Amino acid sequence: MRLSFQGQPFDLHTTLFSGQNFRWRKICERYTGVVFGNVLDVRLDGGGLAYTSYPHLDSIMLPLLRDYFSLDFDIDAVYDSISKDNHIRVAIERYRGMRILRQDLWETVVSFLCAQASNVPRITKNVEDMCESFGSEIGLGRHNYPTPEQLASAGENALREIGLGYRAKFLVDTARCVADSEIQLTQLRTASYDDALASLLMLNGVGDKVANCILLFALDKPSAFPVDTWIQKMLQQWYLGQKKTGLKRMRMWAQDYFGQHAGYANQYIFHSSRSFFGGCRGAVTTTKIKHNFSAPKHERN
DNA sequence: AGCCAGGCCCTCC
DNA sequence: GGAGGGCCTGGC
C-alpha cells in the first residue's frame, strides 16, 4: 500500500529518529516499527511512502498512518509562524520535513518515563526489552507496549532487572494510577494545555519536561515545549546567555517567544543541538542506529 | 575515577 | 521558589 505526501515537506528518516519514538529500526532502505499494535514496514517511494502492515490490512492502516505522520498538517504555515530569527530558520532549513508524530498516549507516557536521565540507545533498549518481557506478542519478532495492567503486575523489581533503574518505581506507580482509573488519560485530549499539564504532574515521576513531551507528542498540544539539558544549552547559546534560569521559566519564555506552535520549534532546536554540540554523549548518528539494530533479536536466537 | 546523561523527588532554606 | 543531594545504570 502507498501513502502519498506529494508537495509536502516530509523527511521520513529524520522524523523517525528524532527521539520522539524509540521503536523504529532502519535496515538498508527499509524502516520497521510498531505502530498502533501493528508491525510496519516502510520505505520511501517517489513522492510517497510504500508500506505493509501486520496483522491489520494495509488499507485499514492508511488513515491511521496519515494521522500518525500528520500528513494533512500544514507544516509550512507552522514554519512561518515559528521563524522568529535566523537560528531557527537555519534549523528548519536543515531538517525541513521533520514532523512531530501523533502517537499513542499510553506509549508516550511510558517512553518518556523511561527516557529521563538516559540516552537514545539506552532508552531504545529499555523500551524494547520491556515490550518483549511484559507486552503481548504481535508477530515478526515484535511486541506491544505492556498495558497499564501488565506493567503494574510486572512489578518494580522485574523492571529493575531489565535495567530501568530508579525509573521502575515511576513506571509501576503510574501504571497503577492509570489501571485504577485514578487519572483518565484520554480525557486530557479535550482539556486545555494548562489543565492537562496539571493533571500529568500528579503522576509520580512526571515533571515539567516529561509532561511537555506527552502533551506535544500525544495530546495535540502544539505549544508544549519540553526543556531538557540539550534544549537548555541551545536556548542559552542562542537567546538567553549563560545566566542561570529555572527550567520552567525557560519553557515559558520559549512558549511566549515562539507562540502557538512552540513545540515544532522545540523539535528543531533539539535536533540542531546534536550537531551543534557534536561529539557529546547522546548524539545519535545513522551508523550508531544501524549498529545497534543490525541484528534483530528474533534473528539472533 | 569521576562525571553526566532528553529528570524527578525530597529536603532545607 | 530554588538550590542541592540522591537515585539506577552505562559510557567515556
Image: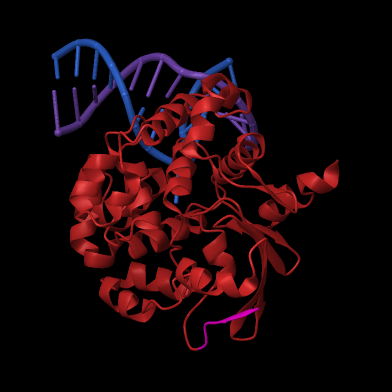
Chain colours: A red, B blue, C purple
Q: Quadrant of residue B10?
A: top left
Q: Position of residue A120 (x, y in %)?
A: 56, 46
**Range of residues picked out in magenta:** A1-6
Q: Quick check: A237 left or right of A129?
A: left
Residue A87 higher or lower than A250, as above or below: below
Image quadrant holding the C terminus of chain A, namely top right
Residue in view at x 20 percent, y 55 percent = A192
Q: Position of residue A191 (x, y in %)?
A: 22, 54
Residue A129 higher or lower than A288, as above or below: above
Q: Position of residue A239 (x, y in %)?
A: 26, 57
Residue in view at x 50 percent, y 68 percent = A64
Residue A86 higher or lower than A175, as above or below: below
Q: Quadrant of residue A62?
A: bottom right
Residue in view at x 55 percent, y 29 percent = A164
The extreme right residue here reads: A301
Image quadrant holding the N terminus of chain A, namely bottom right
Residue A275 higher or lower than A161, as above or below: below
Can residue A225 be seen here?
yes
Can residue A244 be seen here?
no
The extreme bottom residue here reads: A7
**Closer-to-camera residue (A84/A297):** A297
Residue in view at x 29 percent, y 59 percent = A221
Q: Position of residue A227 (x, y in %)?
A: 33, 47
Whether residue A5 appears in magenta in the rendering, the answer is yes
